[in-house]
Image: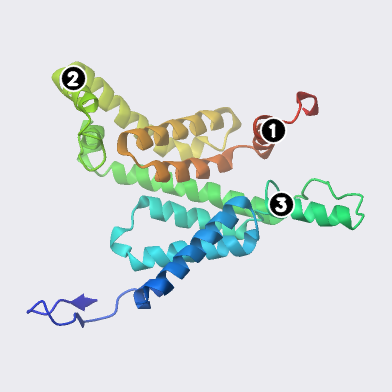
Amino acid sequence: IFVTPPNWFDNPKELDKAVYIWSPYIHLTSTNCIWAIHIGILLANICMALGLFTRASTILSWMGAMFYVQRCSSSLFGMDAMIMILLFYMMLAPGWQAYSLDSLLIKYFKRKAGDKNWNAPPEPLISTNVVIRMVQVHFCIIYMAAATSKLQGAAWWNGTALWGVLANYSFNPMHIPAYTALITFLAKHRLLWEILMTTGCVFTIILESSFPFLVWHKNTRWLMISGSVLLHFGIAILMGLIVFSLCMMTLVLSFVPAETSKSFVERWILRKPLENY
């Protein structure tokens, strides 16, 4: 904890120590060194996205994200927290087993060595189930915490919370005439305004508070998943929090059965023929 000197010219004086944080960016003064670490982290991100050297690249990506968060803790936002959660679980998960360059390299070397089972599907691992369950439980905790915290605010009870987002210059493109005309139109029609604002608040509260309980039942799981995707799609559009919404949608995908994800990827991305199903 640093205190600014009275004359504003001397160096800040260290008053006390708070929670321990560390980042190389706190200590580096050379521009070349800063750029070297930054580019290294970006390369680790690319390798992680491609599934190349997956275990090492995910660990380095998590460390890199932590470097930025620890250096700029005053700008820490929900997006940063979700990214850190995702990267933490990716470090634990066997992400190289399918749809990665690592899996292609493993198959290539097995085939080159004469292994007849070179193209066999990945073996089920207990660690995979553990990580998926941890993500699911963590997501439920996030939603329950979000719902209970919202219920402590008067804006969510009187139905004005959504309007505080729509008319906020920090989030929305108020400089676009069409958007300004839209919210002006809503403000001039009280009944329509009340219906839309109240519906949005009620939908958010009911979804977040019921999700941790209903998502575990197969009859209501898809309703909860669809509602969550709809909620975060709206957040991305209305608040401009695109990366945050993508992180939340990625987390909620942990509730999608593995068979559904596999058939979707192979049918629509890898373009395998229908007779395989």
**Rendered location of residue 214, percent (x, y):** 51, 35
According to the picture, the residue beneath numbered tag 3 turns out to be 97
- Determine whether label 1 and label 2 are within 8 Å by CB: no
Q: How is the image coloured?
A: rainbow
Whether residue 169 is visible to the viewer of this picture, yes or no, is yes
111 relative to 29 in the view: left or right: right
User: In the rendered view, would you say 59 is above or below 148?
Assistant: below
4 relative to 200 in the view: left or right: left
**Rendered location of residue 181, percent (x, y):** 19, 23
- Which element is circle 2 on? helix
The single residue placed furthest to the left in the displayed view is 7
First along the sequence among labels 1 and 3 = 3
Report the front residue among 215 and 18: 18
Q: What residue type is labelled 3?
A: Gln
Q: What residue type is labelled 2?
A: Phe
According to the picture, the residue beneath numbered tag 2 turns out to be 185
- Crowd band around label 2 with a 10 angstrom C-alpha radius: few (<14), some (14–19), many (20+): few
- Determine whether label 3 and label 2 are within 8 Å by CB: no
Cα distance between the residues tagged 1 and 3: 16 Å
Whether residue 125 is visible to the viewer of this picture, yes or no, is no
Numbered disc total: 3
Q: Residue at the location (20% across, 39% down)?
A: 169
According to the picture, the residue beneath numbered tag 1 turns out to be 263
Q: Residue at the location (46% across, 57% down)?
A: 84
Q: Quadrant of the C terminus?
A: top right
**Rendered location of residue 80, percent (x, y):** 40, 55
User: In the rendered view, would you say 28 is above or below 109?
Assistant: below
- Which element is circle 3 on? loop
